Amino acid sequence: MSDIRTPSFYFEERNKRRKNIDNINLRLDEILTHLNELKGRPNTTKAYKKIVDSEIKRVENKQDMERRKKMSKVIINKMVDGEPSEVTETIKREIDERVAQRVEPDLIKASQEMWRDMFGDK
């Protein structure tokens, strides 16, 4: 049994984890591409399209969670390295990204309502 205190153990495990995460992200991208192809097929039922849409949302949520985990690790690594200015900038960018993701659906909905009010049928 290898000693976990040795640097080689740490780096080998870290590289294995990174490789696994990269493989997961690649697989999620492939699944998303396949689901979008399924969505575009003609002559399918509404139930089929709804199932594909729900699967697409599930995969997109999984990708977002993986991205968030990765950014958290980046921030923690920068904290450990002692780079306070880079840490604050990275945190600011991540907060901006998360706020934009949450606000975007509401902005789209509001813009659609404004469009209907200004140019829609009356």
Image: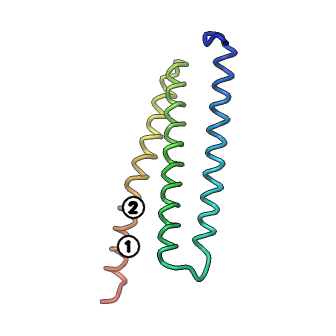
In the image, residue 41 lies at what x, y percent? Answer: 62, 76
Q: Nearer the viewer, residue 92 or 24?
A: 24
Is disc 2 surrounded by few (<14), some (14 to 19) or many (20+) residues within 10 Å? few
Is disc 1 surrounded by few (<14), some (14 to 19) or many (20+) residues within 10 Å? few
* Mark closer to the chain start, 2 or 1: 2
Query: 117 left or right of 81?
Result: left
SS for callout 1: helix
Q: How is the image coloured?
A: rainbow
Q: Amino acid at mark 1?
A: Gln
- Mark 2 vs mark 1: give the one in front: 2
State whether residue 8 is above or below residue 105: above
Q: Amino acid at mark 2?
A: Pro
Q: Are marks 2 and 1 in contact (CB under 8 Å)?
A: no
Please name the residue shown 37% across and 83% down the image.
119
State whether residue 107 is above or below residue 78: below
In the image, residue 31 lies at what x, y percent? Answer: 62, 57
In the image, residue 112 lies at what x, y percent? Answer: 38, 73
On-image quarter of the N terminus: top right
| Tag count | 2
Quarter of the image for residue 118 reads bottom left
Quarter of the image for residue 34 reads bottom right
Tell me, for residue 105, which label it has, or none: 2
Tell me, for residue 40, which label it has, or none: none
Find disc 1 in the rendering and name its residue. Answer: 112
Please name the residue shown 54% across and 36% down the image.
70
